[in-house]
Image (cartoon, rainbow, N blue to C red):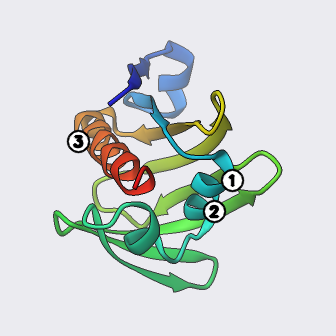
Amino acid sequence: MSSAVTAPTSCNWPEWNETRPGRFTSIRKEILIDNRPESVWAAVRDVGAVHERLVPGFVVDTRLEDGARVVTFGNGLVARELIVDVDDAARRLAWAVVGSPRLTHHNASMQVVADGEGRSRVIWIADLLPDASAGTIAGMIEQGLAVMKKTLER
C-alpha cells in the first residue's frame, strides 16, 4: 500500500489557550488508489452508502437523517456526522461529528485528486479536540483508508 502520513500536529498558543483551554490536533493522511478519480469520488460522495461502497466492514451501517448521517463503525462506535459540504467540482466532502461524548470538536474533509493516469490520491484531514483522542482517531483514519483502497481497487 502506498500512503503518505503526516503526524498529528497540536496547537498550544498562549492566546488560544486563554479562550480554549487544552490542545487541538490536526491529522492529515493520504493514500494512493489505483482507480479513476471519478470512480473514487462517486463512492466518497455517496454519503448514505459508506458501509456498502466505500469502507465495508470498517463501517457496518449508515443511516441518513436531516442534513446528517449516523455511522456505525465495525468496532461498535456510533457517530452522528453533520454533512457540511459535498463539492463535486473540487471532489471534496466535509463533515463534522456532533454530540460526541469523547470529542468537544471534530471537523473533517476528504478530497479526491488525480495522481497520474487512472490513479487517485485521497486526502483525509481531521481537526479535533481534545488532542488526547488523536491516537485513536488517527488509527481509525488509517484503517479506513486501507479498507477504502482494498474496496476501490477491486
Identify the secondary structure beneath mark 3.
Answer: helix
| Residue under the point 40% across and 74% down | 52
On the question of residue 128 being in view, the answer is yes
Amino acid identity at mark 2: Ala
Q: Which mark is residue 64?
A: none
- Which image quadrant is residue 47 in? bottom right
Task: Report whether 39 appears left or right of 25.
Answer: right
Residue 66 on image: x %, y %: 61, 85
Q: Which mark is residue 42?
A: 2
Amino acid identity at mark 3: Thr
Q: Earlier in the sequence, mark 1 or mark 3?
A: 1
Tell me whether circle 2 and circle 1 mark residues in contact (CB < 8 Å). yes
- Label total for image: 3
According to the image, label 3 marks what residue?
A: 136
Residue 96 on image: x %, y %: 53, 57
User: Compared with residue 41, is residue 131 higher up or lower down, i.e. above or below?
Assistant: above
According to the image, label 1 marks what residue?
A: 38
Q: How far separated are the C-alphas under marks 2 and 3?
A: 28 Å
Residue 46 on image: x %, y %: 59, 70
Q: Residue furthest left?
A: 75
Identify the secondary structure beneath mark 2.
Answer: helix
Q: Earlier in the sequence, mark 2 or mark 3?
A: 2
| Residue under the point 52% across and 77% down | 48
